[in-house]
Amino acid sequence: MESFDLLMSGFGTALTPTHLMLAAIGVLLGTFIGVLPGIGPAMAVALLLPVTYGLEPTGAFIMFAGIYYGGMFGGSTTSILLNTPGESAAVVAAIEGNPMARKGRGSQALAAAAIGHFAGGLIGTTLLVLLAPTVASLAVGIGAPDYFAIMVLAFIAVTSVLGTSRVRGFAALLIGLVIGLVGLDEMTGQQRLTFGSLQLADGIDVVIVAVGLFAVGESLWVALHLRRRPAEPIPVGRAWLGRDDLRRSWKPWLRGPLIGFPFGALPAGGAEIPTFLSYAVEKRLAKDKSEFGHGAIEGVAGPEATASASAAGTLVSMLTLGLPTTAVAAVMLAAFQQYGIQPGPLLFEREPTLVWGLIASLFVGTVLLLVLNLPLAPVWAKLLKIPRPYLYAGILFFAAVGAYAVSGQVADLLVLFVIGVIGLAMRRYGLPVLPAVLGVILGPAAEQQMRRALQLSDGSLTGLVNTPFSIVVYAVVALVLLWPVANTLRKRRAARV
């Protein structure tokens, strides 16, 4: 009851005209910036951080929350329409969203994403209010073996459901893991795969990898085939979901937040792992699996709801522990410190107006996201009517700008186009791109957690499975690996009978 009363006072803060305007500006700015390839919500918040110096802390963080949610939706928009993720959490949206757009159903995919973000944000923020203390206390007890087990589950789940074969899926994952090795070893300081280049010592940013594999690889692939096929504008459908679309989407909208929120709250979370897992779950539960990979709306609705709920989950660790689990949370933590505020267990007592005003603004931001972006869905979809030579030239331009903006180094542009050529080769030989991106995102973290677990156990492999949580996760991994084999044997046995 106390939390409810504090939340009501937070709405009183968030619904003032000034704060409501700041939330709307944040949502619009986040969406527009998120649409640009390679410029996600973290970069948007970082770029706009100096703009908020003149604002009081509550208004600044309400604006940040709008930018966060808007940037995530913008990233999914460019994934759906252009097969170019604006950020790593929007990678999954390209799997089914882009094929839908190519079939003239881009507006329906955008509507499913917008409603998914609304449902995920609403459910995730409600869970934030109800479960933040409990989830935070559980997250403190999660150790290195548990983190490593979760990442192994993500690797296996994604490579098992994507691509034409498991071999190709694991080959793509291996490419991503190798790219993730580039840079300095965090524990020994030794250079790995840098070829003596100081620019590669810090590793390759995941934004550059995602944009290179998707945007540049896609653009080069289209360029190779433009002379074979006429460059006709892709048809755009209506902006609203039909009855069949709603029937297929409402369950993924509700399932997604239950996957996204817990992972977002973990101190190794973020939206990458749960969105991949959500896609795997939806494909497993689908009645007609043949449509997946060719424009299944469930593959957009579920992961997008998951990503939005995960965004709410990241605030659990950030507000209660002062522990950022995503790049955006890290930037917001820097903003807190800029105002002389230290997130942690005492934050709710010392700054109740700011904290509950921020949480209430998340509810407001989800509503604004839906209200502003559903009518704009046809506008975004009209991007597909641009002739393909101009469209992909623009994609290459914004991809280069986004890559250069990461660190301001020309070397990043060279790395971008090298990775783009790798993406082109992967398309040529039928390797799925998603496992490679996942390997880059989670590979370094998985290596670090594995080495920590082995150090704690003096090099014994039992250190990787010495907790109940890790044992349960590995049991799920075994189930994911063995279930298709068992299912195949069952079908063969049934055919013999």
Image (cartoon, helix red, strand yellow):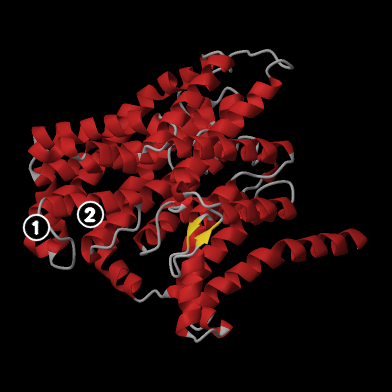
Say which element carries label 2: helix
Q: Nearer the viewer, residue 142 or 479?
A: 142
Classify residue 64 by image quadrant. top left
Q: Are marks 1 and 2 in contact (CB under 8 Å)?
A: no
Residue 469 in view in this figure: no
Classify residue 219 by image quadrant. top right
* Picture coordinates of residue 422, whole percent (x, y): 63, 40
Identify residue type, mark 1: Glu
Q: Which mark is residue 351?
A: 1
Residue visible at 74% across and 17% down in the picture: 228
Give the residue pinned by disc 2. 333
User: In the rendered image of this protein, does residue 28 appear above or below residue 270?
Assistant: above
Specify whether 348 is left or right of 87. left
Classify residue 16 by image quadrant. top left
Q: Nearer the viewer, residue 139 or 435?
A: 435
Residue visible at 45% across and 23% down in the picture: 239
User: In the rendered image of this protein, does residue 22 appear above or below residue 271?
Assistant: above
Identify residue type, mark 2: Leu
